[in-house]
Image (cartoon, grey):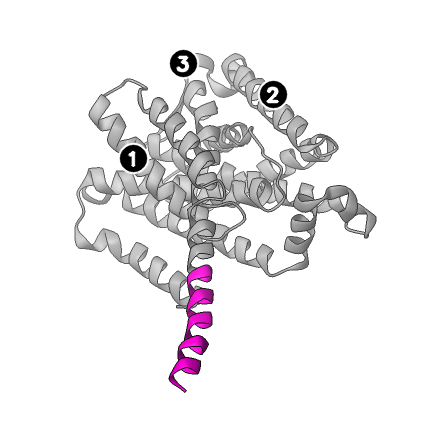
């Protein structure tokens, strides 16, 4: 089955899923799975293809949430669909903020870059708590309650996230088939050699980072409108970044389907554990165990590991077939 057919099957199934009459809890689960699938695919552009592990994406998730919240505060929301139309503005604002940050941070190496980005996360979190005139501080920022029917409340958010996932996956395909993807792969393999052969390493890294955080911010905007209230500790939460990174590693970095698969497995598992364990955070222990298992058993992730095993099996089959024909002759 070709990639285009697999994509058509996936998105056909996603579009049809709400039509089968799922209960609210199931659609709510799918909304969060889609959120993390989009963010993991976005993180994959910089953390997977370029090999620069950003630990600060939750900062841009929060920026997107607050940007949409402020737009809702100063713009009229009548039909309920206006905030969705503002999402490109949210993504553009985050990308423009991320551009100079990346231009500075990308001058460091990969391990230092991780430290710089997680420092950015805590800076943004501190600002969210203290800029009370903008964010509401610890008391939070209220958004208009979406005027959607209770019976189908989740569906508009669901379909917007399906659209964002399509955008994220199309961007991934574009990266994989373009010179930008080759440049990012060269950066991941050996940045000094890439620069030596004429690759504009800083430019492609900054571009990938800006696109990545722009998509993440749009998801933050969807989340804020879905929840209708923004608290700093949830909007700029390090656990969001941890989840995104784990999902990408589990599914497989620098792949198209890996982040989506990782989000489906981990977010569905997290929601189940949260339901079973209530308000406790014991599911974080499960996160730690998953990370250890990935490092020990699937260091390249599910998709690359399965692909390698299928490739070796086909290779063995092709070697065995001529041998059998020779004996029968």
On the question of residue 165 being in view, the answer is: yes
Residue 313 on the magenta span: yes
Quarter-of-image position of residue 191: top right
Q: Gap in Å between the C-alphas at discs 2 and 1?
A: 29 Å
The image quadrant where one finds the N terminus is bottom left
Q: Which residue is mark 1?
A: 269
Q: Which tag is nearer the camera, tag 2 or tag 1?
A: 1
Q: Earlier in the sequence, mark 3 or mark 1?
A: 3
Q: Residues within 10 Å of mark 2 (few under 14, many from 20)?
A: some
Please state which of the two labelled residues, at mark 2 or mark 3, is closer to the viewer: 2
Using the image as rendered, state which of residue 118 and residue 109 is in the foreground: 109
User: Badge 1: few (under 14), some or many (20 or more) residues near its Cα, within 10 Å?
Assistant: some
Q: Residues within 10 Å of mark 3 (few under 14, many from 20)?
A: few
Inspect the magenta stretch and tell me whether residue 273 lies in it: no
Circle 2 sits in a helix, a strand or a loop, which is it? helix
Give the magenta range.
311-329
The disc, 2 or 1, on the residue closer to the chain's N-terminal end is: 2
Query: Mark 3: which secondary structure?
Result: helix
Disc 3 designates what residue? 139
Residue 17 is left or right of residue 53, and the answer is left
Residue designated by label 2? 119
């Amino acid at each position: 089955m070709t990639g285009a057919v697999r994509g058509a099957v996936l998105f056909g199934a996603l579009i049809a899923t709400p039509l089968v009459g799922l209960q609210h809890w199931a659609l709510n689960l799918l909304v969060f799975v889609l959120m993390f699938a989009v963010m993991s695919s976005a993180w994959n552009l910089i953390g997977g293809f370029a090999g620069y592990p950003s630990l600060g994406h939750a900062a841009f998730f929060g920026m997107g949430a607050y940007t949409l919240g402020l737009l809702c505060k100063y713009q009229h929301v009548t039909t309920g669909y206006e905030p969705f139309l503002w999402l490109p503005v949210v993504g553009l604002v985050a990308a423009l903020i991320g551009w100079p940050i990346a231009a500075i941070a990308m001058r460091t190496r990969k391990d230092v870059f991780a430290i710089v980005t997680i420092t950015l996360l805590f800076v943004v979190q501190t600002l969210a708590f203290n800029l009370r005139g903008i964010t509401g501080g610890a008391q939070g920022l209220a958004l208009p309650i979406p005027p959607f029917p209770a019976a189908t409340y989740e569906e508009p958010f669901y379909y917007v996230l399906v659209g964002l996932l399509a955008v994220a996956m199309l961007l991934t395909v574009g990266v994989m088939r373009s010179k930008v993807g080759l440049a990012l792969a060269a950066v991941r393999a050996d940045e000094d050699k890439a620069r030596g052969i004429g690759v504009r390493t800083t430019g492609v890294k900054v571009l990938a980072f800006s696109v990545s955080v722009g998509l993440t911010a749009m998801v933050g905007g969807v989340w804020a409108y879905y929840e209708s209230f923004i608290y700093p500790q949830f909007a700029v939460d390090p656990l969001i970044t941890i989840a995104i990174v784990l999902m990408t590693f589990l599914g497989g970095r620098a792949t198209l389907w890996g982040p989506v698969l990782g989000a489906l497995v981990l977010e569905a598992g997290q929601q189940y554990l949260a339901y079973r364990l209530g308000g406790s955070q014991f599911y974080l222990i499960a996160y730690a165990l998953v990370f250890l298992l990935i490092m020990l058993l699937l260091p390249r992730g599910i998709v690359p590991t399965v692909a390698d095993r299928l490739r070796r099996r086909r290779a063995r089959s092709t070697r065995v077939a001529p041998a059998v024909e020779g004996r029968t002759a």
